Amino acid sequence: MRYSNECQSRGCKCHRGKAFRHGPYWYLTIHRGKGKQKLYLVPARKIRQVRAGRTAYDRLWSNLVHLSELNMLILKSEP
């Protein structure tokens, strides 16, 4: 999740300088491979839920990496 004082509307005056910025806005970034990403605006009332989901995702990913490492050790030890 990332924080911004600028909105994603390209024509908005907040992109012209600090004096025009408004917000804050929180965005969840989803990576779609090959350098592509999608930003989703997170409503203030859902920030806690999104953070909890991100923490769970990070923990899941870490466990999957660990499992892959264990599988590689098993494969290397077999004749």
Image: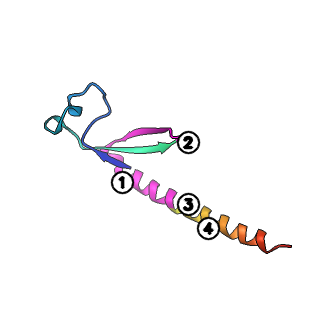
Residue 40 is situated, as x and y percent measured from the top left of the image, at 41, 39
From this view, report whether residue 11 is shown above or below residue 74.
above
First along the sequence among labels 4 and 1: 1
Residue 30 is situated, as x and y percent measured from the top left of the image, at 48, 43
Specify the quadrant that holds the C terminus: bottom right
Identify residue type, mark 2: Gly
Q: Residue at x 61, y 62 (%)?
A: 64
Residue marked by disc 1: 48
Residue 76 is situated, as x and y percent measured from the top left of the image, at 77, 71
Identify residue type, mark 3: Leu
Dot 3 falls on a residue whose secondary structure is: helix
Dot 1 falls on a residue whose secondary structure is: helix
From this view, report whether residue 16 is shown above or below residue 52.
above
The disc at residue 66 is 4
Q: Residue furthest right?
A: 79
Segment colored magenta = 32-58
Residue 49 is situated, as x and y percent measured from the top left of the image, at 40, 52
Dot 4 falls on a residue whose secondary structure is: helix
From this view, report whether residue 13 is shown above or below residue 51.
above
Dot 2 falls on a residue whose secondary structure is: loop
Viewer-nearest residue: 39 or 73: 73
Q: CA distance from mark 4 to mark 1?
A: 27 Å
Residue marked by disc 2: 33
First along the sequence among labels 2 and 1: 2
Identify residue type, mark 4: His
Q: CA distance from mark 1 to mark 3?
A: 18 Å
Identify residue type, mark 1: Arg
First along the sequence among labels 4 and 2: 2
Does the stretch in magenta take in 40? yes
Q: Residue furthest top?
A: 11
